[in-house]
Image (cartoon, rainbow, N blue to C red):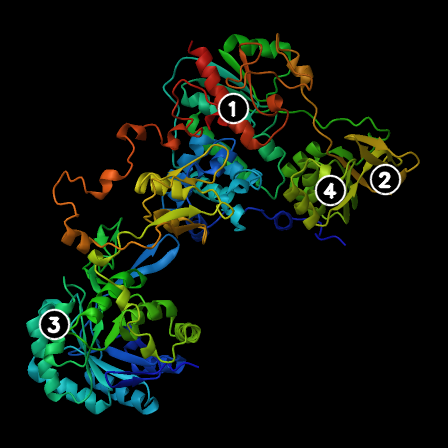
Amino acid sequence: MAEFFTPTTEQEFAENFAQLKPVMNRTEALYESSRCLFCFDAPCIKACPSGIDIPQFIRQINSGNDTGAARTIYEANYFGNACGKVCPTEVLCEGACVYNLQEVKPIEIGRLQSYATTKVIKSGEKLFGPGADNGKKVAVIGAGPAGISAACELRSLGYTVDVFEAKAQPSGLTVYGVAPYKITNEETLAEMAYLQAQFGYNTHFNSPIKSRDELEKLEQKYDAVFLGIGLGKTNELGLPGEDKINCTGAVEFIAELRQHHHEVAVGRKVIVLGGGNTAMDAASESSRLGAETVLLAYRRAKEEMGAYEFEYDLAKGVGVKGLFNVAPIEITGNGYVAGVKFIRTETSDGKVLEIAGSEFVEPCDMVIKATGQAKQTEFLGLIPGLKLDGKGRIIANAHTGQTSNPKYFASGDAWNGGAEVVNAAAEAKLTARGIHAYLSK
Amino acid sequence: MPDLSINFAGIKSPNPFWLASAPPTNSGYQIMKAFDAGWGGAVWKTLGVPVVNVSSRYGGLNYRDKRLIGFNNIELISDRPLSHNLREIEEVKKRFPNHAVIASLMVQTRQEWHDIVRQSQDAGADGFELNFGCPHGMCERGMGSAVGQEPKILQMIVEWVMEVATKPVIVKLTPNISDITEPAMAARRGGADAISLINTIQSIVGVDLDQFAPYPIVDGKGSNGGYCGPAVKPIALNMVKNCAQHPDIKLPISGIGGIETWRDAVEHILLGASSVQVCTAAMHYGFGIIREMTSGLEQYMVEKGFNTIYDMVGKALPNVLHWEDLNMKYKVTANINEDKCIGCQLCYTACEDGAHQAIKLNAGTRVPEIIEENCVGCNLCSLVCPVEQCITMERTDDGTQHLTWKERTAAGTAPTVFEDEKAGGRHHWVPEPSAALGKERHKTLPGKARLYSGETVLPAEAE
C-alpha cells in the first residue's frame, strides 16, 4: 500500500513533501531558545563545521534581538538559512547538545537558525556590505555553497567577483540536490538573492566554463580563480541494461524533482541502488511521489550503510523497504526497465563476496542509481599544473585552499570529495581568506 | 486524613486557602464560583467610596518563556457601589455559611470606618481586613500604604474599628516600609485580632522600549504600581518570619505573597502563617488551581504526620537565626557526580567568574573538577547546575566544632582593623589578576570569520 497518493498539483506536492523543519513562529522560537543552557565552550559550536556561535545567537533570539542572531549566524556561515534546514543537525550541533546526555530533547538549533535568518531575509535588512574596493578581481567557477560563500567573503574583503554557473540558478545542490522536504526552492533562492543584494558579486548563469580557451580568458582577466565546481554526474555502474529507459541516476532524478515537482513521474515499483544519504533521499522521494513500493538495495549489511541512521529512519517512515547484502548484476527488461537481477552477497574481512548461484530477479519499473558521483577530472585536466589525488579530488592547502597551480583555489565537494553544504560554506570562507593572503603578498 | 480546617483569630474556614482582596474577589459571582471550586475563604475586594479606574491596569514581568513571574497593577479598590457589594456578601454567606467571607475595608474618617464596619457586619461578613497597604492611587489620598507607613495613624484607625467591630479584625500590612514589625506592633497595640501580609510592593514592572513609558501604559503614560506574583514570595516570607518571630506581636498571621502551589503555601505556614491568601495565581490560572493546592497540602501533611494546620505553623521558625548565631565551623564542599554531569560547564563559568575559581577543566573530558582546597562551599555551582542532584554540597567538617560570629566577637578573635590578620579572605587562595587575561573563549571562535586579522584558522584547529 502506498502511503502517498501521486501528487498532481503543486498543493498536493507540497503536502507530500511537507517540510521536516518548518520555520518556527516567534512563540516557538521564544520557548525553544529559553531552553538553551548557554554552555561554556559549547559543544554545539565545536560540532559545527562553520563554527557558528550558537549559544550567542540563541540568546539573542531569546532576548528579542532576532536581527543580531542572524548577524551572528551569517558572520560564520553565509548559508545560514539553508544550513539550518539541510544540515544533518542530528549528528552535528544538535547531536552535540549536552541535553542528549540527560535524555532530554536537544535544542532545535537548526530550526532556530532558520528562524532568525528567514526573518532577516524577509525583511531585507542589510547586515553586511562589500569592503572597500581593492582593485583586484577573482573569478568563481560554480555558484554552489562553496562558490557563493567564497564570493561573499571575497566581496567583503574588497574584491570584484564574477561567478560563472553552468545551471540557471545559484546555490548548487541546495536547490538541485537536496530533498524537497528539507528546503524549498523559494527559501533557497531567497537566501541567494539576499546575499547577492548585500555583497554585490556578479553572477553569470547558464555560463559553463568547460574549455581551455575559457579558462585562459579567466586566468588573464582575473587575479585568482576559485574552483567551486562540486561533483559530476552519477557514476556508471557498468551493468548490462543500464541504458534502459527508467534507469536513472539519483543526482539527476533529484535535480529533476527539485525543478519540476509533481510533473516528475516515478515508477510504481522503484528500486534504489545504494546505501548512502542520497540513496535515502531518492527512496524517500520516490515514495512521496506515490510509488507503490520502494525497495532500497544495498550490497552490504544494514549496519554498514553510509547513510545517517536518521536518514534511513526517515525513509523507513514513509514505507521504504530495505534489501541488504545484494549486488545488482543486470538491469532486465525490453527497452524499459522490468527488474533488477541481483546476486546475494556476504561480507568477509571488509570485502563483499558474491554467493554463487544465488541470483534472483526483483521486478520493478524504475531503477535509481545512488551509487556515487563522478569527479570532474576531465575538466580539471584543462588546468595546467593542477594536481588531483588518487580519488580525483583536487589537492589544495587545507588552510588556504590554494592548489598546485597558485592562481587556482578550491573548496567544497571537488576538494573534499563530497560533504555537507556546511562544509563547503566553511571551507570556502577560509579559502577566500587564503586568496586574500596570497593576493596581499 | 489530615484536618485542613482552620480557626483564624475566630474566623472559621474549611481550609487555609483564601482569595486575597483583589480583582478575583470583586463580586459575589466570582466568590461563589471560587468556593464552589474549593477555596476556603475570600477577602472581598476592598470596600470604600467607589473609585473610577484607568485602562490598562496590569503590567507583567516575563522571564524567558515564563509569563507573569512578576505582576503589577494600578487598579484601585472596588469601583462598585457599596450596596451592591453588601447585598452580594449577604447572598454568598447564605449559600456558604461555613466559608470565610472577610470584608476588606478602606475609608478615611472615624465615622466612615464605624459605618462601613457596621454595614459589613450586618451583611454577614465573618471578619474585616483593614487595607493599609495599597501602594498606589489610594495612598496619595491619605489611605492604603500611607496609613500602613505611619504606625501611630494605623493604630488610631484600628482603635476606631475596634470600637464597633464584633467580628475579628485583620490588619493588612504594606511591605513598603523598612521594618514590617513596626506597623504590626501598632496593629497589636490598637487591638487588632490578626495581621495579614504582604500587600503589593511599590514597583515599576518594566518600561516599554518603543513608547518610553512604564507598564501598564495609560495613553502613553504610566505610574508606579503594586508588585506581586511568584517573584515577591522571598520578600513576603521574610516579612512573615519577622512578624512571627517578634516576641511582642503574637498575632495570627495570614500569609500573602507569591503563593501559586501548595509548596509556597507550606513555606508561608512553616514560617508562621496560619492562613494563606492567593491572588496573582488565581488571576493567571483561574480558581481551579485550588485543587492542586489542597491536594498537595494534604499529601504533605500525611507524609509528615501533621494532623492539623496548627501542627506545622511556624515549624521552621526555630531554625531561622540571626547571621551572627550561625555555626562558622560548619563546612561543605561541592561534589560533582561524574555520571550525572552533562558537561555544560555552567558550574565552571559560575565559579570562575562569579565565585571563587575553585573549579577547573581538564583536557579530554567535559566534566569539570572541584579544586577542594579553593572551594569555600558557597553553593553557586550546585545552584546553576541544570541536572538534579549532580552537584551536591557534602559536609567536610567533623561536626565537633561550633563557633559563631557572636562568640568570636566575645572572644576577641573577630577581625577589627582594616588589615586584620584574622580576616577570612586572608587565608583563601585568590589567583593573580593578570591570570585573567586571554581566557575568554569567544575571542577565538572560528565563526568570527568577518573579523579578519590576516590569519587563517581552520575550524578544526581553533579549539
- Residue position for label 1: A428
Q: Residues within 10 Å of mark 4 (few under 14, many from 20)?
A: some
- Residue position for label 4: A265
| Disc nearer the start of the sequence (2/4) | 4
Q: Element type at marker 2?
A: strand
**Observer-nearest of B315 and A369:** B315
Q: Is residue A416 above or below residue A342?
A: above
Mark 2 and mark 1: Cα distance apart in space: 43 Å
- Residue position for label 3: B143
| Disc nearer the start of the sequence (2/1) | 2
Where does the image place residue B296, in percent across and percent down from the top left? 42, 72
Q: Residue furthest right?
A: A357
Residues marked 2 and 4 touching at CB (< 8 Å): no
Q: Is residue B379 above or below residue A433?
A: below
What kind of residue is marked 1? Ala
Q: In the picture, residue A358 is in which quadrant?
A: top right
What kind of residue is marked 2? Gly
Q: Residues within 10 Å of mark 2 (few under 14, many from 20)?
A: many
